[in-house]
Amino acid sequence: MKVRRAALVLSAAALLFAYSDIAAVHAQSVMRTPNLNIQPRIPAINPTVTPRIDPNVAGRVVTGVDRGRPDVTMRATPRIGVTSTLPNARYSPNLSSACSYAYRASSGECQDKPVSSSDGGGAGKSVKNGKNGGVSRNTPLAALSPGAIPGEFVAEIDGSLSDAQADALARRYGLVRVESQNFPLIGATIGLFRITDRRPVEKVRSAFAGAAGVRSVQLNFRFLLQDQKTVLSEGDPAQYALAKLRLPQAHALASGANVTIAVIDSGIDERHPELMNAVADNFDALGSKEGPHVHGTGIAGAIVSHARLMGSAPQARILGIRAFGVAQNGAESTTFVILKALNYAALHGAQIINMSFAGPKDPLIERGINATAARDIVMVAASGNAGPKSPPLFPAANGNVIAVSATDAQDKLFAASNRGGHIAVAAPGVDIFLPAPDEKYQMSSGTSFSAAYVSGLVALMLERNPALKPGEVRAILIGTARDIGSPGRDDQFGAGEADAFAAVSAAGAAPAVPVAAASPPPATEKVSDPQQVPATRALNQPAAAMASEKSDVGEPNRPAAQ
């Protein structure tokens, strides 16, 4: 019995030892090669499944605002494939913020604009740079509603209505008439109306469009100036644009004397030394009291600088039209204001209109552009700074407008410059040295300044041959452009980089030059030094184009030159 008991004890001890050894081996195996399925720090979330959030986790990500704890800063939960917590810089425009292309910088960053909404144009909250959502790759571009002023629209109304009758009409539809005006340029009376409550814009627009005395109704679209960056600077660096455009040679033939260029832009500092005696007239389409603005001053400088710098047409007259007011991220304007600007320019002697802004296709602006072209006024516009993915922007994409893209000192396309079959020519627009308000200078980039150079170039052509029609001006610019990029015409540079000397020479050789045309300076005159160009202008003597203003107003529209 004792032996048997001892054997049982030994057997039990052996079994216990064996079990302990197995457990130890298993634990070591877990430590060496774990089989646990650990989720990564950034899980691949199925976008069709709503992620679950542990409410017990401190500092959890939530949506909305905790009204009970205003001291707590909340973060929005990212929606996979739609928004990002990263800033918009360096994004492709297709992946950038949900703003229309006219309001997107070359970096992909949204400028000032309303949130896209179903009411057709921004009747909603504004979103600040770098904090708004992006657009999915699969979001169709057409779904992005164009920027417009929230709660406003413009309508063509019966011109026989008195102000009191127009106000009564507006009140019947829950509107207030902000202002209305007769526009001889398009032969219509246009009113600006504002919704007095929170009804959807489209619903009100549809109802108002059916009212007696109302002929058409549309959104009051936004337009933005097309500059990319502005750096205040001192000194007088070399202006590479002069050599690229062959302006010194062209100025030996013409300098833009007695040619009036309307600049529809922000405010111009006409007291700047570069612009002294260059601004013949001013019109404030905004009715504001804003002072000079860096963009408008720079655009005027690209055209008529004549002190330390040299513009493309240093002797031209500027008709300064303030249509762009300071906004959160630059300067912006609207359908109604731009129409007022076009109307004023056409009726006050403008031979050329520079439009360094861009926006959506706008029926009323298109109507104004076409009517302006019928008066044989040359129009030049910036192609836009929305980049290669952008659809055509307006007014540059209108067939009656000369669209200009931007190049740099190496004849490469400005990265933000719009492309397309509507581009006529290119011109320097990167790191352009220009005047700024308060006798300062700036270094700026954008298709805005490319368009301004070409507007001045057209002034040289019209001084050389005042009989040129808009279609002839376009043909000469295209025919004399210096081919860059791919051989032949392309969507980046159009026909190539504008050549001022070749264009002015061709304009002088064109037929039908009237006897009364101003005689050009001697061909041997050197004007490469800005100080050699006279800075005085007889602004108290109206140009011939201005003298004919009254007779032009009542004339029926003539067909545009093709």
Image (tube, grey):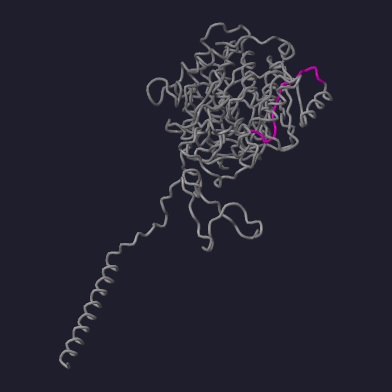
The quarter of the picture where the N terminus appears is: bottom left
Quarter of image, res 153? top right
Counting from the top left corner in percent of width and height, residue 400 is at: 57, 17
Q: Main secondary structure of the magenta part?
A: strand
Magenta range = 148-161
- Say left or right for 84 vs 395: left
Q: Does residue 296 appear anywhere in the picture?
A: no
Count of numbered circles in the view: 0
Whether residue 154 appears in magenta in the rendering, the answer is yes
Q: Residue at x 58, y 40 (%)?
A: 111
Q: Residue furthest bottom?
A: 2
Quarter of image, res 227? top right
Q: Residue at x 73, y 22 (%)?
A: 190
The quarter of the picture where the C terminus appears is: top right
Q: Does residue 397 appear anywhere in the picture?
A: yes
Whether residue 128 appears in magenta in the rendering, the answer is no
Q: Residue furthest right?
A: 164
- Say left or right for 29 vs 532: left
Counting from the top left corner in percent of width and height, residue 490 is at: 42, 23
Counting from the top left corner in percent of width and height, residue 208 is at: 72, 25
| Residue 428 higher or lower than 182, as above or below | below
Counting from the top left corner in percent of width and height, residue 482 is at: 43, 22
| Residue 447 higher or lower than 22, as above or below | above
**Which residue is more in the foreground, 393 or 531?**
393
**Which residue is more in the foreground, 334 or 403?**
334
